[in-house]
Amino acid sequence: MNPSNGLFWHLALLLVATCSWRQGSGRESQLRVGKALNVFVRFGYLGISMRVIPTNDTAEDVRWLFKEPTRNIYKDVNNYAESNEQNTPGIFHGDFHMEFCDNRRQLYQAYFRDFTIERLDRPWEAFTGGWFPDNAAKKLGINTSFIQGDYSYVLVRVVRFRETGKFRSELPLNLTLENDVKERMNDIVTGNVTTAVKFFENVGTHYINSYTTGNSLYQVFVYNRQNYQVIKERIKTKGINSLSKQDLYHFFAPWFAEHLGQIRSASANNTVERWARRKLQYEYLLVKYVTLLKLHGNGTLLRTLDTLLGNDAILQLDLKSLKVIFHNDPEKQNWFHEVLDNHMELWEANMPQN
């Protein structure tokens, strides 16, 4: 396959698949384990149909999690799935963590650390392939000038988990397929790329193996190379637990970092972001700034945040290849994977380099 030709082909495929969905394909939009979807419909732009990071179209009265067209592949898959909610009052249901990113690419990768797409080497690019400096900076809460230069980053994030959906175990091979899925499988001809592509369009490429929803607050700290290495070496040699509260405030302060990003929520929840700007202010030697690190070890603020962060964003998503449904036909299964792998490589090669 010629990658340059592949770009036109895939862009045409994107438009055709999107139009066919708009015309009514009978698919549902539900975030449920076992549902199949086609990652190529919006590859590089999955964030427009999955609430994973702030988007420009968010309004206070508009709340959605998942708008990607999906379809059932099994008739009785719900018997093997489970869903749990974490709503016990009085405690914080989440975690507080930071990730050190040598460059912009690692920053993107860190944000989408918990998103996996089987047989895709760089799953974060399925979300960030369409990011250009201005909109990337806006989503991350930093100034555009700090997304293009020779900078390093620390991503600090507080995550509040709400609902988790997953399979209790590996799916049995004897599950009953939906009738239309079996018909589409029969249409695939080994050696014929078009039949496999049509299967992607009509059924999908992957199914949802697990997901976690909730919301998060995050803040990006931008550093020059020298100061970044100071923090990184300190933590590498002594561990992050060796940092005192004063160390944290020093290393993540305006006089040490090049830039302190805004505190943002994954769902662009303006109410929570306003709360953060009011409650997470820190003042030192007449310098006042807002820092997410004020939440670290503060049980009172974390418990308040627990009640504010709703079920407004997807925090973790694991997509598995639909290879499992071809287990009775190894030759067709190998062909499905060959075409899938080729398409993924073409998409990764042809997406704009962010």
Image (cartoon, rainbow, N blue to C red):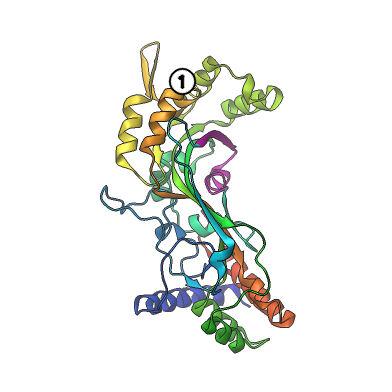
Which residue does the image show at 41% across and 59% down from the upper left?
Answer: 66
**Which quadrant holds residue 302?**
top left
Asked whether 134 or 211 is in front, the reply is: 211
Q: Residues within 10 Å of mark 1 (few under 14, many from 20)?
A: few
What percent of the width, then of the height, locates residue 119?
65, 64
Residue on which disc 1 sits:
255
Span of residues in magenta:
94-113
What percent of the width, then of the height, locates residue 31?
46, 60
Please identify the quadrant where the N terminus is shown: bottom right
Callout 1: SS: loop
Amino acid type, mark 1: Trp
What percent of the width, then of the height, locates residue 49?
41, 61
- Any part of residue 251 in sight: yes
Q: Identify the residue at the far top of this view.
A: 285
Residue 340 horizontal side relative to residue 139, left or right: right
- Any part of residue 291 in sight: no
Asked whether 278 or 261 is in front, the reply is: 278
What percent of the width, then of the height, locates residue 213?
47, 49
Which residue does the image show at 34% across and 36% down from the upper left?
Answer: 273
**Vertical relation: 173 (above or below) 86:** below
**Which quadrant holds residue 216?**
top left
Asked whether 312 or 344 is in front, the reply is: 312
